[in-house]
Amino acid sequence: MFVISTTALQKNAAILREVKDAAGCHLVLALKGFACWKAFPFLRDDLDGCCASGLWEAFLARDYFKKHIITYSPAYDEGDVTELCEFTHHLDFNSLSQWYRFREQVMAHPRFLSGELLCGLRVNPECSTGDTALYDPCVAGSRLGITAEQLAGQDLRGLSGLHFHTLCEQNSDALETTLTAIHEKFGHLLHSPQFTYLNMGGGHWITKPFYDRERLIRLVRETREKYQVDVWLEPGEAVAIHTGVLRATVMDVFESAGHRLAILSISATGHMPDVMEMPYRPDVFLVDNTSPGAGRPAVIMDGEHYHPTAATGPWTYRLGGPTCLAGDVVGDFAFHRELKIGDTLIFDDMAHYTMVKTTTFNGVKHPAIALQHGDGSLEILREFTYADFRDRLS
């Protein structure tokens, strides 16, 4: 079961509101990281809206968040643009070829003419600050954003914003480095009265305890004052980090070639894809039935509702999923005691970039989704059945 703490969501949202108010910027939720729409009421008051990666996410923002919508996609088709012009507030394009293709259509729309719809262009500052190439849009030959060289001498009529997104799970020092490149390569555009907003994308780990929020506030303020533009931030992970867990049951334990193996009710490839893609190693906790918190329905690790035992100790197990994929493995984890069939394991940080990526691969049962409220009670939002697996492919 995926369990999301509404209390933890509100704590993150309060931090984000404090930062955006101090910086004088706008901050929206990136739906690609967290899109559990029944949790939106716990975020809506503190955030300014949503960032959508395409038409369907934009629909979700329109229907359930009901505030400002920023839409950016590497490519749109004609139907996308026609529908998005009716309700999105920012429509950002990935290339000049896309902008030139749709410019006349967009600029003729009443919402554009009234100023309710603004258009921007994603730029590539060619400034890599991360360690994982899979998440670096500044690598040579990147399909995301247009470089300063490609922009030189081009007709930018109709555009009023620039958009960059180069960070991934990083502190504000990476933003400072990136902004230096932005200033050098695109500052002349931002100084023009034509450009009225700058979107600094996501990847800012704002709600992490170690994150230098004062530097972020300073950088945003300096940028606003330098160019007289509105600044937008669109974090996804910072909204949902440390707010959700995935609860798994040990289905089998055995040994093979000197390794202790535990087969779980959840799948790395199906339900925790970032474990294999990022790669990401989650913290794992064993719910010890002998602990003082045993028997309570709550499962979020907030120090109140149960007492988990961290995955350390002499008993090492390779944790794997129930699919036929040989590589469906979370990793090797050590526990204070021998694992037994029926034990409950808790995987931390399973709210962001997890539920948005899950699949029904191999017909493995999909975990339910629940909210945990401040009193510890669980509200089941969705339980999945065979029909969900069957109907997806028909």
Image (tube, grey):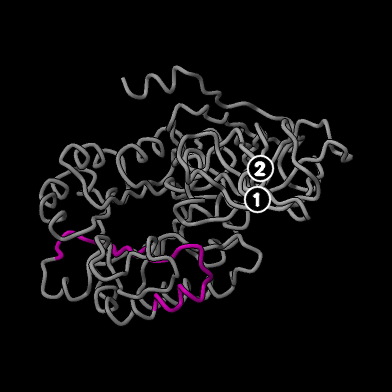
- Which residue type carries mark 1? Gly
Q: What's the magenta region?
A: 156-179
Judge left or right: residue 107 versus residue 24: left
Q: x%, y% of residue 14?
A: 63, 53
The answer to the question of whether label 2 and label 1 lie on touching residues, with beta carbons closer than 8 A, is yes
Residue at horizontal 58 percent and vertical 55 percent from the top: 281
- Mark 2 secondary-structure assignment: strand
Q: Residues within 10 Å of mark 1 (few under 14, many from 20)?
A: few
Q: Nearer the viewer, residue 41 or 180?
A: 180
Q: Report whether 212 appears left or right of 139.
A: right
Between 81 and 289, the residue placed more toward the observer is 289
Report whether residue 9 is seen. Answer: no
Q: Which label sits on residue 255?
A: 2
Image position, residue 309 (x, y; %): 79, 48
* Residue 178 shown in magenta: yes
Q: Is residue 236 left or right of residue 213?
A: left
Vertical arrangement, residue 347 with respect to residue 175, above or below:
above
Q: Quadrant of residue 16?
A: bottom right
* Residue to which mark 1 is pinned: 258
* Label 2 environment density (alpha carbons within 10 Å; few <14, some 14–19, many ≥20): few
Dot 1 lies on which element?
loop
The amino acid on which the numbered mark 2 sits, given as a three-letter code, is Glu
